[in-house]
Each structure stands twice: as structure tokens, then as C-alpha cells.
């Protein structure tokens, strides 16, 4: 399995720390899917903005339908995330 080096929440500073603070979830912290961008904070922000647009932006699909598509796709891909 591939391994991507990431900067932990405890070691983050500057712009990365600000983004981690912004995107942190109360019980779990920052999702690993965002941490993979830790070496490139602009990429992290762009990834989050795209995700937010796809999941919460204007669409003919409801939020529940979009979540169901994401879960189904992850299951088909055998993604544990």
C-alpha cells in the first residue's frame, strides 16, 4: 500500500495550522483525506472547496442523495474511508 507523508495536527504551523483549525471536526480532528495535502496547503484548501461545492452547492440532487452516491462509490471501490 502507498504511504503519503503528512504533517500532523500537532506539528502544523502557519497557514497549514490555520486550515487544520478551520477544517477540524470536534471528535475526530482533521480527516486523513485532507491531511494528505499537508505538504501543499493550497491543494488542501482547493480540495476542501471542491468537496464543499459538490456536497453542498446548488444541485438537482439532495445532500442525502449525494452522500448515498459517495458511500456507494466508496463501497464499490472497497474504500474504508
Image: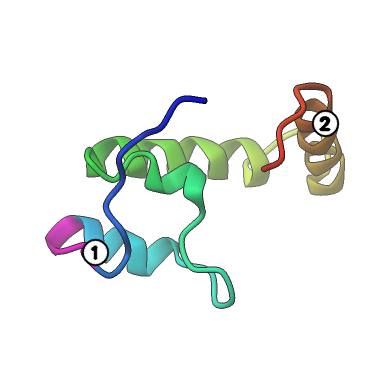
Camera-near label (1 vs 2) is: 2
Q: Quadrant for the C terminus, please.
A: top right
Q: Residue at x 55, y 77 (%)?
A: 26
Task: Residue at the far front: name it.
Answer: 1
- Position above or below: 69 against 17: above
Task: Residue at the far left: name it.
Answer: 14
Q: Quadrant of residue 60?
A: top right
- Position above or below: 7 against 68: below
* The label number, if any, that marks residue 17 in the structure image: 1
Q: Quadrant of residue 27?
A: bottom right
In the picture, measured across the screen, residue 16 lies left or right of residue 64, that is left
- Asked whether 16 or 50 is in front, the reply is 16
- Asked whether 39 or 59 is in front, the reply is 39
SS assignment at label 2: helix
- Asked whether 37 or 11 is in front, the reply is 11
Q: Percent position (x, y) of residue 12? A: 21, 62
Q: Residue at x 83, y 23 (%)?
A: 76
- Position above or below: 38 against 74: below
Q: Percent position (x, y) of residue 15? A: 17, 57
- Position above or below: 11 against 78: below
Region of the chain picked out in magenta, as a range: 11-15
* Mark 2 burial class by Cα count in 10 Å: few <14, some 14-19, many 20+: few
Q: Which residue is mark 2?
A: 75
Q: Percent position (x, y) of residue 79? A: 71, 32
* The label number, if any, that marks residue 29 in the structure image: none
Q: Residue at x 49, y 35 (%)?
A: 50
| Residue 44 can be seen in this image | yes
| Residue 60 can be seen in this image | no
In the picture, measured across the screen, residue 15 lies left or right of residue 45, that is left
Amino acid at each position: 500500500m502507498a504511504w503519503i507523508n503528512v504533517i500532523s495536527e500537532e506539528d502544523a504551523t502557519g497557514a497549514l495550522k490555520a486550515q487544520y483549525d478551520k477544517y477540524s471536526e470536534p471528535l475526530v480532528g482533521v480527516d486523513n483525506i485532507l491531511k494528505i495535502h499537508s505538504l501543499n496547503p493550497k491543494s488542501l484548501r482547493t480540495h476542501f472547496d471542491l468537496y464543499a461545492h459538490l456536497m453542498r452547492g446548488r444541485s438537482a440532487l439532495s445532500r442525502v442523495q449525494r452522500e448515498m452516491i459517495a458511500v456507494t462509490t466508496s463501497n464499490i471501490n472497497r474504500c474504508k474511508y
